[in-house]
Each structure stands twice: as C-alpha cells, then as structure tokens.
Image: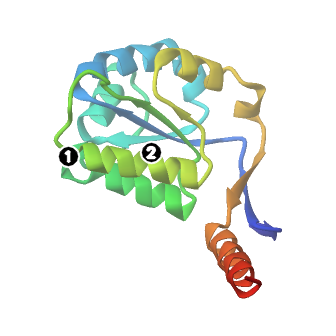
C-alpha cells in the first residue's frame, strides 16, 4: 500500500477475491451466470452471502466461502472485508423492482464498494464486461481517495476564505 497525494494505492493481484451476492428474485440469474463463466471464475477466490454461496457451491461446484445471509448481516460482513482490502471485486445481482427489508445494508455495501474503489457489477452485461476485461488476469492498482485529507483541505480553504472577508 502506497500513499500518493490524496490517494492510497492498493495492488489487486492477478487472482481476485470476488464477492457474489444476489437478492432472492435474482439468485437463479446469478447462479446461471456463474455456471456459464465457471472456467474463468475458478481461477479466482470466491465468497458470497448465505443462500447464494450455497447455491453456487452446489450447482456450479465451485469452492466459495459463505458468509451470513444478507438480511442477517452478510452484506455487512462483505462490506467489512472490502474495507479491510480482502475483497477486490463484487458481483451483486440485486432486484430493482422489490424493496428489501435490509435496503439500508445494501446501500451501505454499495457505498463501501465505491469508497474503496472496487469494480461492481449489478447485472449480467456489466458482469460480462468486467469478467472479460484484460485487467481480470493482471495486477491492478486501485486508487482509494483519502477523504479525510480532502475534507481537511476543504476545511482549511473554507477557513481561509472566511478569514479573507
């Protein structure tokens, strides 16, 4: 990990740590996508939330680490691993037509993914594009913005502007 200006650089290895998540109405879609891409995904480390991980393990026969179900804290477990630098990539087939009882957790998970600059696919076409990218099999430097440094800089600028009036 290197700090450059107001970024922290984290090197993503060739072998990615990929989180696989799906809401109930999208689980079959994700499982089918995983099965269709088994040959590419077997080169990476997989994890997922509760039922989704079990379905993938059973039907696609890929090794996958299972966390708790999303509503029982699985989204938060994935989010904490993103913050720790242990998840590089997330494929999350969410259901845009049905409210989820854990929507705040989902929103927090997506915010953490953006904050820590990890690629996220929320549908099949995006997942296809990301998985077929040449970067999937290369090292990659993620640039994580140091928001505390930016906030401090803005506060100083604001103070200076007030002091000059």
Q: Quadrant of residue 50?
A: top left
Q: Nearer the viewer, mark 1 or mark 2?
A: 2
Residue located 56% across and 21% down the image: 126
Point out residue 159 in the picture as x, y percentages from the top left corner. 68, 83
Q: Is residue 58 left or right of residue 18?
A: left
**Which quadrant does the N terminus fall into?**
bottom right
Q: How many marks?
A: 2
- The residue that appears at 63% across and 67% down in the rendered structure is 147
Q: What residue would you read off at disc 1?
A: 71
> Does residue 73 lie above or below 20 as drawn?
below
Which residue: 48% across, 16% down?
124
Quick one: SS at disc 1?
A: helix
Nearest to the observer: residue 63 or residue 5: 5
Circle 2 sits on which residue?
A: 110
Image side of residue 98 versus residue 38, left or right: left
Residue 11 is situated, as x and y percent measured from the top left of the image, at 74, 54
Label 2, residues with CA under 10 Å away: few <14, some 14-19, many ≥20? some
Mark 2 lies on a secondary structure that is helix
């Amino acid at each position: 990990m290197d700090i450059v200006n107001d970024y922290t650089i984290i090197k993503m290895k060739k072998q990615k740590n990929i989180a696989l998540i799906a809401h109930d109405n999208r689980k079959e879609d994700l499982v089918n996508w995983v099965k269709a891409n088994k040959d590419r995904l077997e080169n990476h480390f997989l994890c997922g939330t509760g039922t989704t991980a079990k379905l993938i393990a059973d039907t696609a026969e890929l090794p996958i680490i299972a966390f708790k179900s999303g509503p029982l804290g699985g989204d938060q477990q994935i989010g904490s691993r993103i913050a720790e630098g242990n998840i590089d990539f997330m494929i999350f087939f969410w259901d845009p037509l049905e409210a989820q009882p854990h929507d705040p957790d989902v929103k927090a998970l997506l915010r953490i993914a953006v904050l820590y600059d990890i690629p996220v696919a929320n549908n099949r076409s995006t997942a296809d594009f990301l998985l077929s990218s040449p970067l999937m099999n290369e090292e990659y430097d993620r640039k994580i913005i140091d928001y505390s440094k930016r906030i401090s800089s803005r506060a100083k600028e604001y103070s200076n502007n007030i002091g000059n009036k």
